[in-house]
Amino acid sequence: MSLKGRTAIVTGSNSGIGLGAAEELARAGADVVINSFTDRPEDHALAEKLAAEHGVSVRYLQADMSKPDECRALIERAGGCDILVNNAGIQHVAAIEAFPTEKWDAILAINLSSAFHTTAAALPGMRAKGWGRIVNIASAHGLTASPYKSAYVAAKHGLVGFTKVTALEAAGQGVTCNAICPGYVLTPLVEAQIPDQMKAHGMDRETVIREVMLDRQPSKQFATTSQMGGTVVFLCSAHADQITGTTISVDGGWTAL
């Protein structure tokens, strides 16, 4: 499948799932805008590397997804948006009564409200062209819950609901909106946690991954960032023209339990 001639914006995409989505979109021929809240030489170097590898235009645009004006301005600065991947997200773990208010507000702003602002800015252009794809990166925690993750679970459930409303409002206009719900994905952040988990539980790498980190993932295997990106590309293809307003779980069976 080819996305040549399309422009994709992926929020929170200088590492992890967002970078996996950006890489697979570029591989499929789309021009890509990657984003994070930093503005370092290595961010721009990453864009240049992707462009050279895939022969497409890749730009890095800094924007803080906790700030509504910057979310909307990102879409305008990109100069066009055929594909929007709302991926930016943060996490904090604490009991409800001990959950810091500022952490709750930040998680809701970045994990949920940013998608509202970018979508509101991108939809008019998509409607005018008669084609658009919005893919929201939710989570297995958008369909189920875990203790001590109140803000994250609330935001991801909200993102799934927002996905459905967006799909209904855009139906019949050539624009689709879907949510991908990953389970545990082997990102650099997760990889960095493995040595500490090995030490804490006195287990070797494979055992701690299988019995601790992937306890709720029946496949006992991490999903990969390229698998996430491939799912994004599929949702942007003609094969998915009639898939809208739904969730696709990439979680090794977690939400089947």
Image (cartoon, rainbow, N blue to C red):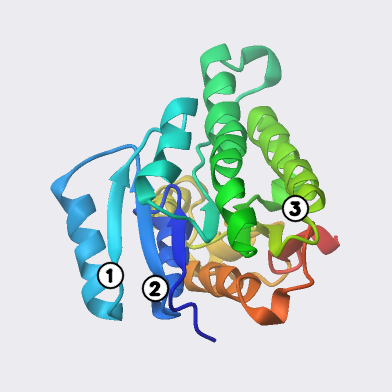
On the image, numbered disc 1 is attached to which residue?
50
Looking at the rendered structure, the kind of residue marked 3 is Ala
- Mark toward the start of the polypeptide (1 vs 2): 2
On the image, numbered disc 3 is attached to which residue?
170
Residue 95: give x, y in percent of width and height. 66, 22
Tell me if mark 2 has few (under 14), some (14-19) or many (20+) residues whose alpha carbon lies within 10 angstroms of its own. Answer: many
Q: Point out the image quarter for the N terminus.
A: bottom right
Q: Are marks 1 and 2 in contact (CB under 8 Å)?
A: yes
Looking at the rendered structure, the kind of residue marked 1 is Leu
Quadrant of the rendered structure where residue 255 is?
Answer: bottom right
- Mark toward the start of the polypeptide (3 vs 1): 1
Q: Is residue 153 left or right of residue 124?
A: right
As drawn, 162 above or below 45? above
Q: CA distance from mark 3 to mark 1?
A: 31 Å
Tell me if mark 3 has few (under 14), some (14-19) or many (20+) residues whose alpha carbon lies within 10 angstroms of its own. Answer: some
Q: Is residue 206 visible?
A: yes
Looking at the rendered structure, the kind of residue marked 2 is Ala
Quadrant of the rendered structure where residue 244 is?
Answer: bottom right
Residue 75: give x, y in percent of width and height. 44, 45
Residue visible at 55% across and 65% down in the picture: 207
